[in-house]
Image (spheres, grey):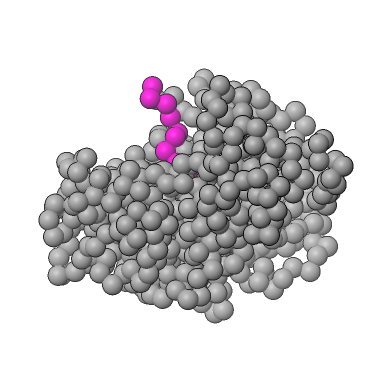
Amino acid sequence: MEKWTSLVRMRQLSLRALRVIWHISTVIVAGLIFATSAEAGARHARLSSDLTAHLNSASNAPIEVIVSGSQEKIARIAQRHGLQVKQVMSSGAVFSVSKEGLNHLAEDVEIDSLSANGVVRADTVLTTDVTGASAAWAGQIESLGPVNGSGIGVAVIDSGIANHPALDKRVIASVDFTEATGSGYDLYGHGTHVAGIIAARSYNNTKLDGTDSGMAPAAHLINLKVLDANGAGAVANVVEAVDWATAHRQQFGIRIINMSLGTAATQSYKDDPICQAVERAAKAGIVVVASAGNFGQTAEGKLIFGAITSPGISPFAITVGALRTQGTADPGDDEVAPWSSKGPTAIDHIVKPDLVAPGSKIVSTISKDSALANQFPDRFLDGPGARDYYSMSGTSMAAAVVSGAAALLLDAASDLTPLQAKIALQASADFMPAAGLFGSGAGALDLANVEDLGPIFEITGSTGYALPSTVSTALGPSIRVAADTLIWGETLIWGETLIWGETLIWGETLIWGETLIWGEGDTLIWGEGDTLIWGEGDTLIWGETLIWGETLIWGE
């Protein structure tokens, strides 16, 4: 606790005073009402947008559908509709159904939502000095170190991990959910690159610039392969991998899950099967880090907003966008990569990403016989050969950087909850006003600022609630609450007045009222009328039509 108390000394931010005003009159908690059999014909389950598109298309091909629930529930549904289970999942099952079968499932009284078993792809388009990792290893960040990720397990849900000298003895378990090789070996190359960013360890006393070590060189890795040799995989397999990591978290010391992959956001995070698995993992105490996606601009260079991929749309995940560091250690020339996906999330309108980290031209480990290495041999910095180092760009790389940073935090304070780790990373980030809230979230990862952290909550008025002791010691001054209502947990509700420093951070769910004032000159009016005014001359009209300055394309 002493180490955590030191960790959470919040820096006094003087550059900006961001004021956020919420007017909340009532909060209604509605119970889930189950339809009776007599009502079955009048109800219809929520469908992901790709299922809706399939129903409206001319195609008569069957489609794979994920149904969530217990195995008893799945057995009843299968018997009732005469279906065969194509894949058993710990959280449900996959069925292959016709259009008619899909409609029948949607009308079933036991089914609230249906999701397509879509395709998940690697999000590919570090320097440890820029992020503060090398300072943490050396013990130069007083509140953290020295730390190197020792004892922290990171589950890498990706294309597998190949043999590499810098990853020797880093991987303690491998599970192949694709059944392609049965060994978890990386045929694509992406997972090995991600693993190296997180936990590669230097060897032979040699150093190649930027590749000497990963962010947390003493962390151990759990290899959960879900992507094939083309960097693609099924949603159901990703869900199974997340649930496997959750179930085996104590056996393998899994504290972090890295998900440098994504699929189109076709439904609310509340119905999305991967996001549901992420929520289960976070509630079990695992920090889940996800890439934001690489859909921030069109081929013509026009900016796209609202294109965060799943599971990055989950409020239970730490969603990471990508920085271009220009190859220097000076943060003054950093910029958010234009292709990095921007928020808010398309369906739930959650502010994402949560922060950004280096993700452009990142050098890390790879296998010379992988598909990426063969397709782009010019990206080798050393190799192909015994020492294979390779340059890649993408929010995949940025997510891996943050997973490594989270391992350093957990090494310093093993009792951190996922929410506390998220807050520590966001509160120490350097806000990037040019990128804005939807481009960079809380800002650029900077572990060096952790030493300036302090209590996040300073209660200046009556809360009306007895806050848990962990709030006052673990979360406590960058928020001053002068209101009568504050609830932290799955739902965060602020009262009338909230004053923040540079960044706004919340829990899983944020409910706000009519007016949000953000930074100098930036006004967000959110409520009746749904009008967002951002910066000078930029107007966002929220709803079916979105208008932002001169150029804005809303993600599909």
**Left or right: 549 in relation to 128:** right
- What's the residue at 21%, 40% (across, down)? 376
Q: Main secondary structure of the magenta part?
A: loop
At horizontal 53% and vertical 49% (from top left) the residue drawn is 86
* Quadrant of the frame with the C terminus: top right
Left or right of 203 on screen, residue 68: right
Residue 130 in view here:
no
Q: Magenta span has 298?
A: yes
Residue 305 in the image: state x and y as whole percent: 52, 32
Vertical order, 207 against 369 (above or below): below
309 vs 411: above or below: above
Q: Is residue 210 magenta?
A: no
Q: Position of residue 228 (x, y in %)?
A: 35, 48
Where the N terminus falls, by quadrant?
Answer: bottom right
Q: Position of residue 301 (x, y in %)?
A: 39, 25
Residue at (33, 43) in percent of width and height: 230
Outermost residue to the right: 38
Give the quadrant of residue 360: top left
Instruction: Indicate the position of residue 55 as horizontal and vertical percent values.
Output: 61, 28
Give the residue drawn at x 66%, y 62%.
457
Which of these two is toward me, 5 or 542? 542
> Relative to the observer, which residue lies in front, 201 or 234?
234
Label count reads: 0
Q: The magenta stretch spans which residues?
A: 292-300
Residue 171 appears anywhere in the view = yes
Where, by quadrant of the figure, is residue 470 drawn? bottom right
